[in-house]
Amino acid sequence: METSRAARQPRLPFFGAALIGVVALAAALAAGHLVAGFISANASPYLAVGNGAIDLTPVGLKDFAVRTFGVYDKLVLLGGMAVVMVLAAAVAGIASRRSPVPGIVLIAAFGLLGGLAVALRPDLSAVALLAPLASLIAGVGVFFWLHRLASAGPRDEVAGATPSRRSVLLAGAGAVVAAGAAGAGGQLLAGTRDAESSRTAVGRLVPAEPAPPIPADADFAKLGTPTFLTSNRDFYRVDTALSVPQVRAEDWSLRLHGMVREEKRFSYDDIRDRPLIERTITMTCVSNEVGGTYVSTANFIGVDLGDLLREAGILPGAEQIFSTSVDGWTAGSPVVAALDPERGAMLAIGMNGEPLPVEHGFPARMVIPGLYGYVSATKWVKDLEITTWKARRAYWLDRGWGEQAPIKTQSRIDSPKGFETVPAGKVRVSGVAWAQHTGIERVEVRLGANGSWLPATLSREVGLNTWRMWWTELDVPAGSHQVTVRAVDKSGYTQTDARAGTVPDGATGWHVISFTAR
Ligand SMILES: Nc1nc2c(c(=O)[nH]1)N[C@H]1C(S)=C(S)[C@@H](COP(=O)(O)O)O[C@H]1N2
Ligand SMILES: [Mo]
């Protein structure tokens, strides 16, 4: 019966059949993306297959991709996958010019592949399988539906109702629009609900041991310096993440292993339920040029990193904390720095009273005062391996940056701005200086290339791990001038004027600005 009916059926036009396959694919991907939006972005079958492909890619090919496409390597992969999928969907359509069965089998096979990719992800629960299931149902459903509309030949025709190409096109267009809306909706949901909703649910973090209040004279913001604390919104941001990793607190855990007596695993609640400490810390990026803005200060809330290490029991010979982010980025920090109670290294979950902003590492990150961020401040951290320097090499080390990277003593002029014009006479000059873990002893300013160094007034000291503001007034006749700043830290070291670039371990030199007095 079925066969004879199918045999009577006219074959669908070549391109029409291909198009039906492609529209069904769009519907499948979009439905999966939408459902993933409610669960986790990573449950999206498309992304799951992509991530699976990245994990399966041989290192040589991965290196080639990174070398050739740079930061676009992931986009190229997703694009390539899209092309392959569209071609396969078109083939599925074309194979079904008479009966929908070959197409449905192919689409179902795709759906199962997506399901497998989701099932194999370590960070997803069984609920996540709903996303590829939605894909499967939408893909097969839309394919079957459009195929039936298109194959309704004259024999099915009721008087007047032409089974026109028009109705098929309309249905197809409707499916595409619905798919677009579903896909965009899933994207929106995943972007806002995922980590952000989890972060909102955490609520305000109240430390058991708050940082001392910041005194009013800790900055000279009215005289042109930055405010002592940087707001979360204004805090500088540096990372390699193409899209900000989305990790829910409830899905997060931190593994501490390697050269320890006892391996540990901490959930978010394990950390949050400890007595939280708060420390005021100025972070700096090694990529900060002299005079640059990759330096900010916040009240970080969390637990002492050294405490966690001591609980695990560090074995003799351990040198390096090799930390890994959920996005695969790695950093290597000295074990001694984390164990030093004077330094105050942290596993931080909060920043200025709030849970860490997603782009600053929610649910948790490392912060080790006095070390540049690339060797100390892993965001979205999920793994700490205690090891040696020989055994593991972190992300930036093979890209030309140094293994040891203490922050260098630096100072910056914030006012006047370079090339500003100011009234001649008494000119106020102000800015910041930092020498984390050592502390700023003195800041000196000079007018002109050969002027004598004049001491600036320092702000109230908050701690050795934070920046310090300074200001002074200079007698400036009309004309073009330059002003230079240098800091002296508490070890007695005077900031060098020898210019060095940021590679391999941080820029040096004095900050000089030119201005005009009139
Ligand atoms: N996962 C991850 N963590 C990271 C980075 C990164 O690229 N990926 N960059 C590091 C660098 S170079 C710096 S300076 C600090 C910056 O932290 P912020 O963006 O919160 O200011 O994060 C560090 N942690
Ligand atoms: Mo950095």
Image (spheres, grey):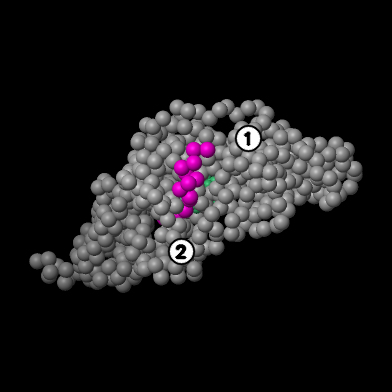
For label 1, the residue is: 228
For label 2, the residue is: 73
Q: Amino acid at mark 1?
A: Phe
Tag count in the figure?
2
Quadrant where the image shows the C terminus: top right
Name the residue rendered at 76%, 37% in the picture. 456
Mark 2 surroundings: few (<14), some (14-19) or many (≥20) residues within 10 A: some
Can residue 33 be seen by looking at this rendering?
A: no
* Residue 504 sits inside the magenta stretch: no
Where, by quadrant of the figure, is residue 251 drawn? top left
- Position of residue 394 measured from the top left corner of the image (x, y, whole percent): 46, 57
Where, by quadrant of the figure, is residue 281 drawn? top right
In the image, is residue 398 above or below residue 405? below
Name the residue rendered at 32%, 49% in the picture. 123
| Label 1: element kind | loop
Can residue 58 be seen by looking at this rendering?
A: yes
Whether residues under marks 1 and 2 lie with C-beta atoms below 8 angstroms apart, the answer is no
Name the residue rendered at 89%, 47% in the picture. 479
423 lies left or right of 510: right
